[in-house]
Image (spheres, helix red, strand yellow):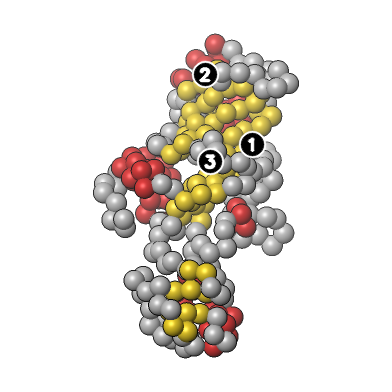
């Protein structure tokens, strides 16, 4: 591919800015300065931009501990998005796999592997997701039973779209006690759902008369939030995490390793 595309794919800059930088001598290929933006390079070449290696990947996978206050979108004119938290030299076509509410924290997978994203999100796949919820009051055995049976969730008048607003019947979900209360004695609950409707966890608790004060996603399928990641931190998936995720998403063997 062209040198300017190679660098642009990896998020180094825009094609026009890169053309200038290449002409100015900022780019070395296999130790030699290359000043032509249309010079042919491939993944086997050693490319450096301003002295830093730039490794090209066709697909990338990152685990983020999404902080509260950041939206799960790829762009927004006013608000910070999860893409703003990625390191600079990453592919520019990365996108979050599914959405977390702005005030929800925790596990978010970002990738440009559309097929994997689709397999994880397709409603028919029922990929389980576990959340830790802080509640305004403790849940009851009756709530556990109602979650396990599946429960009617009323319309959400605050939702911006008709689809988001619609009432639905939640599929059976697991609800159990998290080990501890939080530091202020607020009850914590663990919940596992296999759907991904708008505000689903909050609305399921609201349907049994409890308010979710904060919410954190801990897992999605086989992928578990790395406890070493502080809110806002990101790291590439390990080979093992990726293999397990692909296997669980029914994609079989990894073809890009
Ligand atoms: N359920 C919610 O209510 N919010 C989220 O962010 C995720 C699941």
Element type at mark 3: strand
Q: Quadrant of the N terminus?
A: bottom left
Tell me residue 125's x, y (percent).
Answer: 37, 40
Mark 2 near ligand 1 (CB under 8 Å)? no
Tell me residue 26's x, y (percent).
Answer: 55, 80
At x 26% / y 46%, what residue is drawn? 252
Q: Is residue 164 above or below residue 77?
A: above
Mark 2 → mark 3, Cα distance in angstroms: 20 Å
Labelled pair 2, 3 in contact (Cβ < 8 Å): no
* In-front residue for pair 163/111: 111
The disc placed on residue 107 is: 3
* In-front residue for pair 101/22: 22
Q: Quadrant of the C terminus?
A: bottom left
Q: Depth-wise, is mark 2 or mark 3 nearer the camera?
A: 3
For marks 1 and 3, the one nearer the N-term is 3
Tell me residue 222's x, y (percent).
Answer: 40, 37
Residue 240 visible: yes
Element type at mark 1: loop
Say left or right for 11 vs 185. left
Name, please, the residue furthest toward the top.
141
Q: Is residue 221 above or below residue 161?
A: above
Residue 100 visible: no
Name, please, the residue furthest toward the left.
253
């Amino acid at each position: 591919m062209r040198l300017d595309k190679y660098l642009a794919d990896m998020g180094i800059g825009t094609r026009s800015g890169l053309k200038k930088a290449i002409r100015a001598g900022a780019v070395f290929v296999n130790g030699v300065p290359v000043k032509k933006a249309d010079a042919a390079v491939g993944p086997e070449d050693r490319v450096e931009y301003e002295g830093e290696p730039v490794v090209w990947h066709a697909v990338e996978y990152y685990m983020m501990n999404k902080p509260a206050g950041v939206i799960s979108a790829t762009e927004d004119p006013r608000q910070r998005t999860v893409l703003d938290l990625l390191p600079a030299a990453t592919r520019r076509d990365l996108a979050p796999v599914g959405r977390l509410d702005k005030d929800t924290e925790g596990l978010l997978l970002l990738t440009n592997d559309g097929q994997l994203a689709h397999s994880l999100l397709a409603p028919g796949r029922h990929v389980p997701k576990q959340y830790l919820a802080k509640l305004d009051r403790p849940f009851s055995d009756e709530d556990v039973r109602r979650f396990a049976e599946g429960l009617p969730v009323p319309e959400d008048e605050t939702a911006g779209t008709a689809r988001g607003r619609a009432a639905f019947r939640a599929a059976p979900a697991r609800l159990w006690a998290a080990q501890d209360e939080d530091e202020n004695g607020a009850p914590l609950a663990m919940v596992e759902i296999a759907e991904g409707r708008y505000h689903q966890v909050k609305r399921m608790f609201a349907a049994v008369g409890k308010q979710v004060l904060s919410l954190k996603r801990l897992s999605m399928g086989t992928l578990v939030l790395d406890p070493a990641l502080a809110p806002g931190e990101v790291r590439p998936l390990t080979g093992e995490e990726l293999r397990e995720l692909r296997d669980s998403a029914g994609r079989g063997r990894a073809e890009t390793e």
